[in-house]
Amino acid sequence: MITAAQQDAQRNRDTIFVEDGEVLSLQSFPGEQFVMRLRAPRCASAAKPGNFVHISCDDSRPMRRPMSIMRARDEWIEILYKVVGDGLRLL
């Protein structure tokens, strides 16, 4: 018999992966807020608004930043973020 936890684990299999994204655009808004569009076809095909991606900001800051996906289309995703520290400032 398969438990509910095993069913959840099976359903979530292959949902975590690494993809190098390409910055397509960066829009700036007042208050150090930005919308970044990234070409990331594999991520975009599986993404829904509210899902998270982990983005590397700079080689000097190896810790990735979790960012919520604002919008996803065929080949790209968009994230909205506000600069609140040095890591996001590097982004």
Image (cartoon, rainbow, N blue to C red):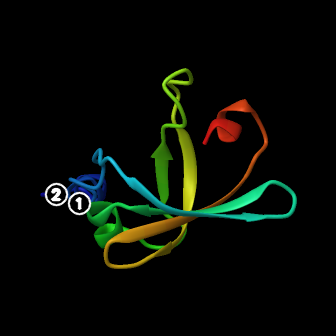
Residue indicated by mark 2: 2
To which quarter of the image does residue 86 belong? top right
To which quarter of the image does residue 3 belong? bottom left
Query: Of the residues shown, which amino acid type is indicated by label 2?
Result: Ile
Query: Left or right of 49: which side holds 75?
Result: left
Query: Of the residues shown, which amino acid type is indicated by label 1?
Result: Gln
User: Is there a contact, CB below 8 Å, between mark 1 and mark 2?
Assistant: yes
Query: Left or right of 35: which side holds 48?
Result: left
Above or below residue 1? Residue 61 is: above
Residue drawn 32% across and 47% down?
20
In percent of width and height, residue 81 lies at: 68, 56
Above or below residue 37? Residue 32 is: above
Above or below residue 72? Residue 67 is: above
Which badge, 1 or 2, comes first in the chain's sequence? 2
SS of the residue under disc 2: loop
Residue indicated by mark 1: 7
SS of the residue under disc 1: helix
